[in-house]
Image (cartoon, rainbow, N blue to C red):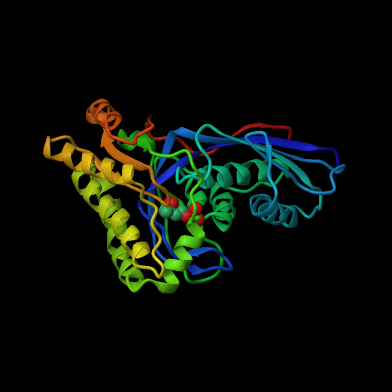
């Protein structure tokens, strides 16, 4: 076939109700429901070119050739696309993040969402967003959520292998802001997959975590629909801290926090005692993401910039769905 190329962009997302634990490893199905916000300021742009002259997939992230597991994860997704499109042509994949990769800033979410959309488009497949979200989820469960904009849910399922994310409300529903306090430029030591599998296998708190999620996720959805920032924030903090508590109690414990993570958490709590509506969440990395509303965004940025160990802040509004930027199909 003649070479076919498509370029897509997807935004990162931050889970308010965290996904942590798999119900089924083969199909990468989550053990708990999750709810996220899509972030306009953080994105991955990916170009996929299927080209008959290649003997193997060539994968570049930020211009750097990828080998080993990072490359294999891309090939695994492309193999699913090739099987669906019924061809064997290899591809060049060029991906660029506008933020640090693999440090708990949700780079795998935007990366696999952009890769899924670009490869489906380059392969000439006419799939809807739900089906592309399911494809992205197979590679990284959180990536399924990045196909959609605004407020997004990834439910659980114990039946079958198909599980797309769903949009709860578009960005126009509510002007929630997220301020990311970047505390490190290092890659994280324990990937989220390793961290959650080890937690599920060894933590005495894992079952309690799974039970809690069945009430926290719907509580967070109700708070979103009611635009109740205090209720949303309280449930969001409880989700993050309970996830980390379950990981800390694993044997041996999994610790993603750095000293600066704690400094930021304490500053967020101190903001609340000053009547600033700010709530924190932390993923499988040391950064803190602070959830607030438009009214408090600039004071939150100011306060976070004064915290010891904060390297920089990234302020974001809610982002839209993943989009195809260019396609020759
Ligand atoms: O999608 P994964 O396998 O990278 O896992 C993401 C896990 C967390 O970021 C910690 C939580 C979440 O729901 O995004």
For the point 29% across and 65% down, the residue is 212
Q: Is residue 250 above or below residue 189?
A: below
Give the quarter of the image for residue 138.
Answer: bottom right
Q: Residue 125 at what x, y percent from top left?
A: 69, 47
For the point 54% across and 63% down, the residue is 28
Q: Is residue 187 left or right of residue 277?
A: right
Q: Is residue 260 above or below residue 80?
A: above
In depth, the one of 157 and 51 nearer the eye is 51
Give the quarter of the image for residue 226.
Answer: top left
In depth, the one of 11 and 84 nearer the eye is 11
Q: Is residue 214 left or right of residue 195?
A: left
Q: Residue 64 at what x, y percent from top left?
A: 67, 37
Q: Residue 141 at what x, y percent from top left?
A: 50, 56
Query: Can residue 253 be seen here?
Result: yes
Query: Can residue 141 be seen here?
Result: no
Quadrant of image for the C terminus: top right
């Amino acid at each position: 076939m003649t070479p076919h190329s498509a370029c897509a962009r997807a935004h990162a997302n931050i889970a308010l109700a965290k996904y942590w634990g798999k119900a089924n490893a083969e199909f990468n199905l989550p053990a708990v429901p999750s709810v996220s916000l899509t972030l306009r300021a953080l994105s991955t742009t990916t170009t996929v070119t299927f080209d008959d002259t290649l003997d193997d997939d060539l994968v570049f992230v930020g211009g750097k050739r990828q080998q080993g597991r990072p490359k294999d994860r891309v090939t695994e997704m492309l193999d699913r696309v090739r099987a669906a499109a019924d061809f064997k042509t290899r591809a060049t994949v060029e991906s660029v993040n506008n933020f640090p990769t693999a440090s708990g800033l949700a780079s795998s979410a935007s990366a696999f969402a952009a890769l899924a959309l670009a490869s489906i488009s380059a392969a000439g497949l006419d799939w809807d967003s739900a089906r592309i979200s399911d494809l992205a989820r197979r590679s990284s469960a959180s990536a399924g959520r990045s196909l959609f904009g605004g407020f997004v849910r990834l439910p659980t399922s114990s039946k079958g292998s198909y599980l797309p994310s769903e949009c709860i409300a578009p960005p126009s529903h509510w002007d929630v802001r997220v301020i990311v306090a970047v505390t490190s430029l290092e890659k994280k030591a324990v990937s989220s997959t390793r961290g959650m599998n080890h937690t599920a296998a060894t933590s005495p708190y894992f079952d309690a975590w799974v039970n809690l999620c069945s009430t926290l996720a719907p509580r967070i959805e109700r708070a979103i629909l009611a635009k109740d920032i205090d209720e949303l924030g309280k449930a969001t903090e409880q989700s993050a801290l309970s996830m980390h508590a379950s990981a800390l109690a694993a044997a041996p414990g999994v610790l993603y926090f750095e000293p600066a993570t704690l400094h930021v958490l304490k500053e967020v709590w101190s903001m609340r005692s000053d009547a600033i509506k700010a709530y924190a969440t932390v993923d499988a990395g040391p950064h803190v993401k602070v959830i607030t509303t438009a009214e408090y965004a600039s004071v939150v940025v100011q306060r976070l910039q004064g915290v010891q160990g904060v390297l920089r802040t990234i302020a974001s509004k809610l982002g839209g769905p993943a989009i195809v930027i260019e396609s020759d199909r």
